[in-house]
Amino acid sequence: MKRDYLRYERVLAAAAVVVCLSALTAFAAPAPAQAQVRGPGAVQPSLPYKMFPEPANKQFPVPKPPFTPGIFPCSECHKDMKPNPKRRTLTDEHTNIVLNHAQGQRWCLDCHDTYDRDKLHLVNGQRIGFDESYRLCGQCHGDKYRDWKVGVHGKRTGMWNGEKQYLLCVNCHNPHDPRFKPLKPMPPPVRPGDIR
């Protein structure tokens, strides 16, 4: 029985390798040569092939951000407040938020817009909604953003060959304290022959 189980595991592993290699070869077709001659005999190397071309400013279908109940829209409280962009410890409101995200280097208005509290802002000053927060996160976490867009990092739902819905970074990470806390391991799987 154990020998059959091990053989079954090897067959599954080999099948997974074949599927992965097939997918890689389908996406990694060589790019057409785009050589240009500049000066006598000089050849410009071809541009790197982009595996997953993406239109500029592509919007990803995402669920509504998981706001704390009663806290959004922020303008409900901030509409009559004069913005104070000075870095400081908050003592009147939001005292329950502990910023444990690049502490000492970041503070609230590095991400939240100073003049429109219902928006976030990018480094270039562009205001974006909370439903595009992945663009904000991607400015510092480019490798995770790249992986998220192609479905390697995070969770997507939908059909393999159709539209998908992407979870926002904040569906899994607290933006103020993003590191995952230690998880208790699940029990190991039960082998089919051991079920009684």
Image (tube, rainbow, N blue to C red):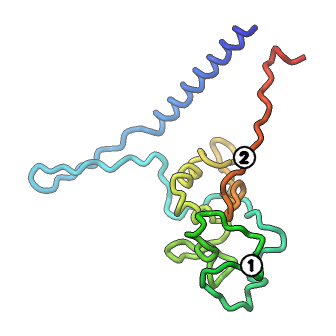
Left or right of 70, for residue 166: left
Near-viewer residue (62 or 178): 178
Secondary structure found at label 1: loop
Left or right of 150, for residue 35: left
Pointer 1 or 2: first along the chain: 1
Image point 68% across, 80% down: which residue? 117
Instruction: Residue 123 in the image: state x and y as whole percent.
Output: 51, 72
Establish if 157 lies above or below 109.
above
Secondary structure found at label 2: loop
Instruction: Residue 81 in the image: state x and y as whole percent.
Output: 72, 90
Badge 2 is on which residue? 182
Q: Distance between the residues labelled 1 and 2?
A: 32 Å
Image point 16% across, 56% down: which residue? 38
Look at label 2 and name its amino acid: Pro
Left or right of 183, for residue 61: left
Q: Which of pointers 1 and 2 indicates the residue nearer the eye?
A: 2
Instruction: Residue 41 in the image: state x and y as whole percent.
Output: 11, 49
Look at label 1 and name its amino acid: Cys
Badge 1 is on which residue? 74
Quadrant holding the N terminus: top right
Image point 63% across, 85% down: which residue? 115
Near-viewer residue (31 or 79): 79
